[in-house]
Every structure is written in structure tokens, then in C-alpha cells.
Amino acid sequence: MDAMHDSATPFAAFKSRWQPAIEHALADLAAPSGAQERLAEAMRYSLLSQGKRIRPLLVLAAADTCGGNVERAIHAACALEMAHVSSLILDDLPAMDDDDTRRGKLANHKVYGEATAILASNALLARAFELLAEYSVGAVLCKELAAALGAAGMCGGQSDDIQGGVATFDDLMKMHAGKTGALIRASVRIGAILSDAEAQKIESLSQYGDAIGLAFQITDDLLDREVEKEKVTFPSLLGVEKSKEIAGQKTDEALRSLESFGPKAEVLRDLTHAILARHS
């Protein structure tokens, strides 16, 4: 059975409990009241398509690990998914990765056109910040998301990718630390901040996010190596076995960062094992 879906594991049980709430909230919050009809439709088209919802689940799991109110963090979890989906819409455009499909259906721009797809991406990102701003610590949360998305985060990593020149292991690590890892790191940090976690706990979860983000990317590269032959990936640069070794090292780093939480981190700990198991 797929380790990411085995209902007997702590993460799967957590996901079974909270993902329906995430899906319901995403459907309810996708577009603000009064949104232009076709634009709102394009926003919902991508946001409500089937996805793993790893980032919103990480927000909630981090809140749970820090003893916070998980239900209170749902809007923040939705904000992280909106930011992620916003980036996916842009990734698929002809000027970026030029992909026709996403999550098993036509990419947003193939249905609504490039102009509306860009607007839907922007509107989802604006909606994400709007949701975070509702919290009493909204300014802090918005700053976290902005840093994750900006020129030193996701956009920087994406720029490294499209500019080319990624030729070494360090180049690849830097690119994915921004392109993939920054938003994963922000997810656990935001969950912790919403739980009034002390600075050391936030730092430990930051280390967890950094490590698990790279482990997640490496396992994605391993799973997708037959369809990513034109890109520089961990397997294409290092080979399959070395990539598996580094994924294991990053998994170990993630697990060590959770030691101070004890049993409270069992959901995050189980998710870490499940990510590594995907390429086994």
C-alpha cells in the first residue's frame, strides 16, 4: 500500500481527519464575494483540482506539533495552497515550462487563455495574503509568505531554473531550496507562529522544512525521471543511487530536527518516512 495513503499511519489518520476541512474551506474561500465571474471560475478550476495538499497539511501538522488550535489554522493552510497553485498556473505557461496539463487535466491557460490564467494566478496570490492578514499576527504571517515567494525564495529558484546554468550539485540544491523548499519551510513556520510557539521551536521546524523540502524534491525527481529527461535533476546529475542516498540524508536531518518535540511530532515524523518511501 502507498505509504502516503496507508490509513493506519499517523500522517494518514491526520490527513483523513483534516483534508476534508481543507477542501471545504478552499471551495468556500477560493474567490472573494463580487469577483468577476470568469476570473473566479479560472481561480476555482486550478485551486479545486485534485492535489496532494502537502503544504496546507504541513501548516496544520506544525500547529498540532506545537500544541496549537488546528482548526484556527485552516485559513492559513488554505493561503499556502493558494500561493502554491498560483505558482503552478505560472509554471505551465508557454513562457515558463510550457505544459499543457496539470493534475490530470488541461492547464489553466489551455482552458481560459494566457491572459486570464495570469490574472487567476495573481488573484489567488492576493487572496492568500488577504486570508493571512485576517489573523492577529497577520503582518508576521504575510512577511513569512512574501519572503518564501520572493526573489530569494520561490521566484529566485524559478529564475535559476529558466536562466539555465544549473550544472553542479550546489546549483541544484540552491535552486530547489528556493523553488520548492521555501514554501514548505514557510508552511511549517506559519503553523508554528499561529500556535504561539517559542523561537527555538520555530527554528527547529524551519530546519525540518528545509530538509523535508529537499527530500520531497529529490523523491519527485526520482519518480519523474522518465519524463524529465531534458531537465537537470538530482538523478540526471548524480545518478539514482546517489540521489536516494541524499534523500535519506535529508530525511535523517528532518527527523533530528523533530527530536525536541517528542511524541507531539509523530505526524510530521511519519510524513517524513512516507516521503522517503515513495521512491522505494
Image (cartoon, rainbow, N blue to C red):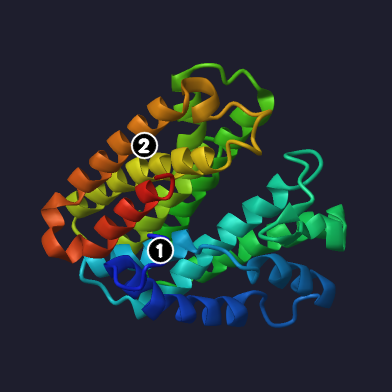
In the image, 13: left or right of 257?
A: right
Q: Amino acid at mark 2?
A: Ala
Q: Is residue 23 above or below residue 111?
A: below
- Residue under numbered circle 2: 247
Residue shown at the point (61%, 79%) measured from the top left: 27
Give the Cα distance between marks 1 and 2: 21 Å
Front residue of 247/189: it is 247
Quarter holding the N terminus is bottom left
In the image, 29: left or right of 253?
A: right
In the image, 168: left or right of 162?
A: left
Please give the label number shown on residue 243. none
For the residue carrying disc 1, how many other residues have a C-alpha within 10 Å: few (<14), some (14-19), or many (20+)?
Answer: few
Q: Amino acid at mark 1?
A: Met
Instruction: Evaluate whether residue 229 shows in this view.
Output: yes
Examine the image and state in which quarter residue 10 appears.
Answer: bottom left
- Residue under numbered circle 1: 1
**In front: mark 1 or mark 2?**
1
Instruction: Evaluate whether residue 195 shows in this view.
Output: no
Residue shown at the point (46%, 81%) measured from the top left: 21
Q: Is residue 164 above or below residue 41?
A: above
Q: Position of residue 202 (x, y in %)?
A: 25, 52
Quarter holding the C terminus is top left
Q: Is residue 108 above or below residue 183?
A: below
Q: Position of residue 220 (x, y in %)?
A: 51, 44
Residue shown at the point (54%, 77%) measured from the top left: 23
Residue shown at the point (30%, 52%) measured from the top left: 273
Q: Position of residue 193 (x, y in %)?
A: 30, 61
Q: Which residue is outermost to the front? A: 1
